[in-house]
Image (spheres, rainbow, N blue to C red):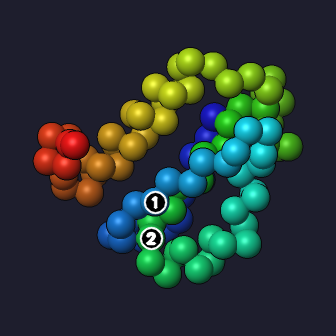
Amino acid sequence: MKFYESVDSSKPVIFLFPGTCCLYSSFDHVLDGLHSYFYTVTVSYDGFNPNEKNPRVLRNKDGEKIRKEILYLFQKSGHSETQHAA
């Protein structure tokens, strides 16, 4: 799994998760507009990136990888985990 991030991390973060059996590039047509307002992170699941040779399998640990990336970016922006907990 890979995370494709935009450049300006000072903007609010928005994660883009492609649907089942979709490529991360399905967001290409909206990314330029989103970059104006957000720091975008697009998730590319293993096996759904034509440039990788990983099998097309979503594993339970993928959810943990996504959670860690969200937490990392949240903390990097100067927020604590409990500050915005629901």
| Distance (Cα) linking label 1 and label 2 | 6 Å
Residue 80 visible from this viewpoint: no
Q: Is residue 47 left or right of residue 75?
A: right
The residue under label 1 is 14
Q: Which mark is residue 38?
A: 2
Q: Quadrant of residue 20?
A: top right
Dot 2 amino acid type: Phe
| Residue at the limit of the structure toward the front, as seen here | 86
Q: Residue at x 15, y 40 (%)?
A: 82
Q: Position of residue 39 (x, y in %)?
A: 45, 66
Q: Residues within 10 Å of mark 2 (few under 14, many from 20)?
A: many
Q: Nearer the viewer, residue 12 or 5?
A: 12
| Residue at the limit of the structure toward the top, as seen here | 60
Find out whether the residues at labels 1 and 2 contact each other: C-beta distance under 8 Å. yes
Q: Is residue 39 left or right of residue 54?
A: left
Q: Earlier in the sequence, mark 1 or mark 2?
A: 1
Dot 1 amino acid type: Ile
For numbered disc 1, what is the local secondary structure? strand
Q: Quadrant of residue 13?
A: bottom left
